[in-house]
Image: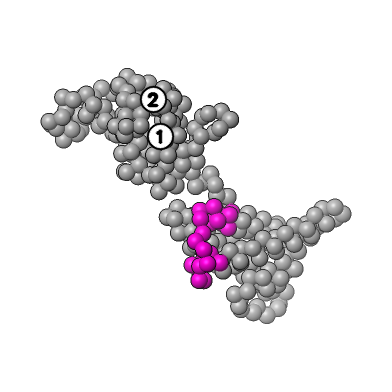
Amino acid sequence: MLLSAISLEKLTNIITGYAGLTSKINKSEIDAITYTSGNEDIICTYEECFADHPDIINNPLYSKTEFKQEKYVRLQLEKINGTSRIHDFIIVYFKHIYDYANEPEEVAEYLNRYFDTDVYSIEKIESTEEYKIYSLDDCLVNYNCLFKESERGNYILINEHNEKCFNKIKSGDYSGAITNSRSLLEQLLCEIRAERLRAQSRRVSGYNGDIGQLVEETFPLISFQLGQVGGAQRAYEKLENGFKDLISGLAILRIGMSDAHSITYVPTQKDAILAVNTVKTLSNFIVKHYFEKFVNAV
């Protein structure tokens, strides 16, 4: 878990009570949270913590306990930032949030204004009254393109689109993420279609931008019902039709909300996540089926 400088500052303000939303705590309480979260190796005295920071020691406010506590918390958070340890620290703090705040929801809301930029969110689980940290990684389906392992065709472009999907959602470019999600699927289908046509000594035609037509040309070449019998065959027939409906929906999303067309309304993060996750799930299945039936089977 990696927090930006501004998020670290705001988290420090919450922990020390300087944000005005939580009560102030002393160093022993801070160290107790640090210890419980498994970060006991970074606990130290003020003198040890500030030994390499003469700017802190020489500050006119150094005699003030609150000044030293704020600097101590900030430096301790910086030590564990970028690791799972800062996640654990925050979770332990929020396990005791009712001891520090009358309105814990306001504390979470305050932090989320800044955490959102880092694609994290602190959310309350209503059934248990506990808090959990969600990240963009939690929301997105993992994508493992098998083309990457064998250096086939345009696998680089396929994986670049996958990377762009994540980065654009992270940066808040939701329309761009929708565009790249469809481009990922288009590139994948074009590559598979071309390979299957070449394998059959058939002419490979260009792509005219109609993803519906691309699907109708590609799916018969890799029949998802291949090797299935009885109920399984009927199930995959239904699934294939469902895939087509999903892809048709993606096409409408792109036309209405992506940066490739005139946007009729501004997409939200959930719209972008829906598009990206749909494409990743479909692409994972298509790639694995293709390699299983037509590449590794040869």
**Residue 288 position in % (x across, y down):** 66, 56
Identity, as a three-letter code, of the amino acid under mark 2 = Tyr
Farthest right residue in view? 230
Would residue 215 be counted in the magenta stretch? no
Q: Are marks 1 and 2 in contact (CB under 8 Å)?
A: yes
Instruction: Determine crowd level at label 1: few under 14, some 14-19, many 20+ residues with C-alpha closer than 10 A.
Output: many
**Residue 169 position in % (x across, y down):** 48, 55
**Residue 263 position in % (x across, y down):** 51, 67
**Residue 218 position in % (x across, y down):** 69, 69
Q: In the image, which disc is placed on residue 100? A: 2
Residue where numbered disc 1 is placed: 107
Label 2 residue SS = helix
Res. 85 visible in picture: no
Which of these two is toward me, 77 or 175? 175
Which of these two is toward me, 83 or 24? 24
Q: CA distance from mark 1 to mark 2?
A: 10 Å
Would residue 273 be counted in the magenta stretch? yes
**Taking 65 as reference, is 225 left or right?**
right
Res. 80 visible in picture: yes
Residue under the point 70% across and 60% down: 243
Residue under the point 49% across and 37% down: 123
**Taking 49 as reference, is 199 left or right?**
right
Rendered image quadrant of residue 222: bottom right
Magenta segment boundaries in residue numbering: 256-277
**Taking 105 as reference, is 270 left or right?**
right
Residue under the point 51% across and 55% down: 268
Identity, as a three-letter code, of the amino acid under mark 1 = Val
Q: If you read the primary sequence from the N terminus, does the residue marked by circle 1 or circle 2 appear first?
A: 2
Q: How many marks?
A: 2
Above or below 255: residue 81: above
Image quarter of the N terminus: top left
Residue under the point 53% across and 61% down: 178
